[in-house]
Amino acid sequence: MPSPASLNLYEAKARLSELVERAAAGEEIVIAKHGSPRARLVPLHTEDTPRIPGGWGPALWVADDFDEPLPDAIRRFFQGETP
C-alpha cells in the first residue's frame, strides 16, 4: 500500500477542493502543521448495501394486540394520573 500524500496546512488550504476530490477517489492525504502530522483526509465510505425491510426475520415480532387500547392502569400512568 503506498504511503499517503503529505502536505503542510498552508498548501492544503490553498488546494482544498483538489484534495477533497483526490480523497474521494480513494487517496489518503495527511495534513501537517510545522512538519507534524495533524489530520488525515480519507474517502468517506457510504453504505453500499440497501436496507431490506424484514431483515431480522424471526428475531423481531409484533404482538397481535399491539394496536389495541392500553389497559386503564398503564394509560393513567402515561397521562400523569395517580393510581
Image (cartoon, rainbow, N blue to C red):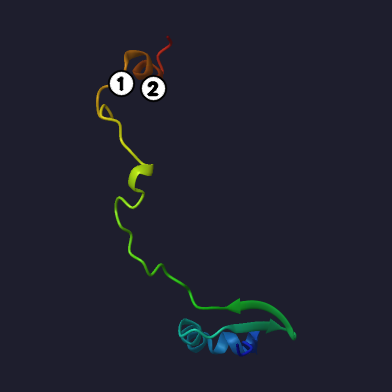
Mark 2: which amino acid?
A: Phe
Could you tell whether 6 is left or right of 52 in the image?
A: right
Mark 1: which amino acid?
A: Leu
- Viewer-nearest of discs 1 and 2: 1
Are circles 1 and 2 on residues that touch, CB within 8 Å?
yes
Could you tell whether 34 is left or right of 19 in the image?
A: right
How many numbered markers are drawn? 2
Crowding near the residue tagged with mark 2, few <14, some 14–19, many ≥20 C-alpha atoms within 10 Å: few
Could you tell whether 7 is left or right of 20 in the image?
A: right
Residue 56 in the image, given as x and y percentages of width and height? 36, 49
Foreground pick, 49 / 59: 59
What residue appears at the point 53 percent right and 89 percent down from the top-left corner?
15
Residue 49 in the image, given as x and y percentages of width and height? 36, 66
Alpha carbons under labels 1 and 2: distance apart: 10 Å
* 74 is higher (above) or lower (below) than 10: above
Mark 1 / mark 2, whichever is N-terminal = 1
When asked about the image quadrant of residue 81, the answer is top left
Image quadrant where one finds the N terminus: bottom right
**Badge 2 element:** helix
Say which residue label 2 marks: 78
* 67 is higher (above) or lower (below) than 19: above
Foreground pick, 36 / 66: 66
Residue 61 in the image, given as x and y percentages of width and height? 33, 38
**Badge 1 element:** loop
Crowding near the residue tagged with mark 1, few <14, some 14–19, many ≥20 C-alpha atoms within 10 Å: few
Image quadrant where one finds the C terminus: top left
Say which residue label 1 marks: 70
Could you tell whether 4 is left or right of 48 in the image?
A: right
What residue appears at the point 57 percent right and 83 percent down from the top-left corner?
28
Residue 21 in the image, given as x and y percentages of width and height? 46, 85
